[in-house]
Image (cartoon, rainbow, N blue to C red):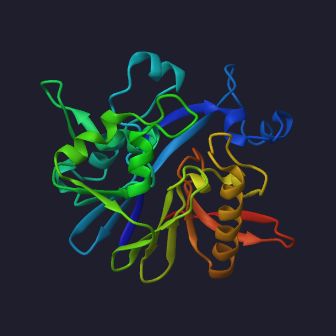
Amino acid sequence: MEIQVVSGGMFKLDGGSMFGIVPKPLWEKICLPDDRNRINNDTNCLLIRKDSRLILVDTGYGDKLNPRDQDIYGISGPTILKSLAAVGIGASEIDLVILTHLHFDHAGGATQLDEEGRLVPTFPNAHYVVQKGEWEDALNEYGTMKNTYRSENYLPLMDRGLLTLLHGDTEIEPGIQVEVTGGHTRHHQLVKIETGTSQVVYAGDILPMTPHVRAPYNMAYDLFPYDTMMAKLRLLKQASDEAWIIIWDHDAEVSSGRIYCEGSGNYQFEALDI
């Protein structure tokens, strides 16, 4: 099994929202904001080559955002199809797409507009998987952020019969499993990959950037911030104890690394290329 980080596109989010209760004089020392108080984010997706299969974890925000949204989020850089093409992968070659949750910056690249302007799955030969509870929350717009759940990103998948709904922790196939964490959304899931030489964990928005290894550094976007912090601390301890490789889904500088503990619950990271 081989893994590779591929970008679903660069964008910007409000720095205060990315760090919740942490005061700006603290977080701006490590993430310098622009004149609109936004900090750089990437959408680090994960490409897994397993035997003859190609598996993608999350899809970035895609190519459907209107000009107003592109300005709000400071959209830049190649989105998922161009990033895959750069490593020699076409959309039709992807066999499976695992979605940690259905927010637009993770599921937006799951669908696209065809030449006639119709919404179609971006990866026509792939099956997509997400938690059943996440699907239901998306349909009911269970959240605090307007337009974070956007039906154009996921309804076409169900309409085409390409979406499988999971019920809790699941082994997707040997060596790849998902675990429900909650916190960021009620049914947010992380992905664990056993490569044969190491355990790789795509933590999703439980641990979006390297500054979030600090216990109080959590996003205001989290529906249940205390649950996020508890899930994150469990993850950090196990990652440190077992030398996991962590994938940060939104860090624009460091996409992967290892966690180590300096004592008294103080965790740090070491960047690692995969």
When the figure is inspected, residue 60 is found, relative to residue 33, above or below; the finding is below
Residue 269 falls in image quadrant: bottom right
Residue 270 shown left or right of residue 156 in the figure: right
Residue in front for this viewpoint, 111 or 44: 111
Residue 88 x/y as whole percent: 25, 53
Q: Position of residue 227 (x, y in %)?
A: 67, 57
- Image location of residue 57, percent across then percent down: 39, 57
132 is higher (above) or lower (below) than 80: below
Left or right, 93 with reference to 27:
left
Q: Residue at x 24, y 53 (%)?
A: 89
Q: Quadrant of the N terminus?
A: bottom left
Q: Position of residue 40 (x, y in %)?
A: 60, 35
Which residue is painted at 33% across and 80% down in the image?
174
The answer to whether residue 261 is left or right of residue 182 is right
Left or right: 57 as drawn, with respect to 206:
left
Residue at position x 43%, y 34% in the image: 77
Residue 122 in view in this figure: no
Front residue of this view, candidates 235 and 259: 235
Tally the numbered discs.
0
Q: Is residue 13 visible?
A: yes
Residue at 63% from the left image edge and 45% from the top image edge: 222
265 in relation to 127, above or below: below
Task: Looking at this view, name the residue that lies furthest to the left.
Answer: 116
